[in-house]
Image: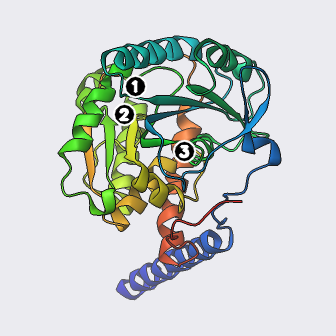
Amino acid sequence: NMDFLCEIVQALVALASLIVIVVLMLAHVTAEMVNLTRHEKEKYFLTVTGEKELFPSLHDPPSRELSVVIPAYNEELRMPVMLDEATQYLENRQKQQPSFTYEVIVVDDGSKDKTTEVALRYSKKYGADKVRILTLVKNRGKGGAVRMGTLSSRGKVILMADADGATKFSDIEKVEAGLNTLNPKPENMAISCGSRAHLEIDSVAERSVFRTFLMYGFHFLVWLLCVRGIKDTQCGFKLFTREAALKTFSSLHVERWAFDVELLYIAQCFKIPIAEVAVNWTEIEGSKLVPFWSWLQMGRDLIFIRMRYFTRAWKLQSSHKMD
C-alpha cells in the first residue's frame, strides 16, 4: 500500500515537473520582443493650424519641467473632467511659478470614439506647445500607449496619469515630494509611485469576498514573482525622472495591464530607487477591466514575465533608439 502511495506521489511530481517545463517552453517560445517601432502617422502631432509637426524624442535633452502622459482608449466621456482638472492645476502653477513649464500628451490608443477630437479641443485652447495628441493607428494596450507618449515627451520629469481622473491631479505634489526624498539618485534615475494601499482596508469592506480573494492573490503573485517592497504596483499615477523613464521603457515588453509590474521589476533590476506615496483615489465608473478575466490575464502575465526573464527570452536592454 505504501509502495502504491509512493508511486502516485512520484507520478504527480513527474507530472508537475512536466507541466512546469511545458509552461517554461511555452513562455519562452511565445515571448515577443520590445516593440519600439511606430507607424509613420504616429511620428507627428497636429498644431493648432492643422499642420503636422514631428514629435521630439526621449533621447533629446529636456526642454520642459514636466510632461504628463495620459493613455486614453475610448475616453471621450470621462477624459474632459480629468483634462479640465489637470490643465487648470498646471496653468495655476505656471502663474505662481513663471519658470514652471509643462506639456500634456494625450495618447489615443486606437479609440473607436471621439477621444482624439475631444483632446484636440484642449490643444486648440492651450496651444500645441502645451497639449499634444498622439493618435495610435491601432490599439496597443495601456502599457504600449504610455510608452509611446513617454518616448515623445520633453519633460525633466514625466508623470503617467489615467484619463478617468481617479487620482486627484494636485496629488502630483505628493509624488514629486516622494521623488525628491530619494537620494542619491544614481545617474539621476528615480521613480515615485502613487499608492492606494492605505485605502485597501476600506475597499475590502466594500468588495465581494471573491474580488478580495483575487486582489490578494494578485498581490501575492506580484510579491512572489516580480516586485518586492511596493504595496500597490497598479496605481496609474507614477512619476519618473527622464533618465529613469528612458531606462525602464526601453526594456518594457508587456503592453497590456500587467505592464506596471514589469516596469517596476526592470527598475528594481537596474537598482533604480522607488518611492511609494499615498494618494487620493476614487473609483470612477466605466473601467475597461472585466474583473475576473483581467485578474486571470494579469496573473498569467506575471508568471510569464518571471519565466521569460528566467529563460533569458527577455533581456534588459540598454536605452536604444526607436525607429
Q: Is the Cβ of the residue at disc 2 closer than 8 Å to that at disc 1?
A: yes
Residue bearing the label numbered 2: 212
Picture coordinates of residue 51, whole percent (x, y):
79, 28
Q: Is residue 59 left or right of residue 121?
A: left
Picture coordinates of residue 151, whole percent (x, y):
58, 49
Q: Residue at x 44, y 12 (%)?
A: 88
Residue bearing the label numbered 3: 150
Picture coordinates of residue 285, whole percent (x, y):
52, 15
As rendered, which of 12 and 218 lies closer to the eye? 218
Q: Amino acid type of disc 2?
A: Thr
Q: Quadrant of the N terminus?
A: bottom left
Q: Which mark is residue 208?
A: 1
Task: Name the mark nearer the viewer: 1 or 3.
Answer: 3
Q: Which mark is residue 44?
A: none
Q: Measured along the vertical axis of the image, is residue 13 above or below residue 256?
A: below
As rendered, which of 81 and 260 lies closer to the eye? 81
Q: Residue at x 51, y 48 (%)?
A: 258
As drawn, the residue found furthest toward the front would be: 98
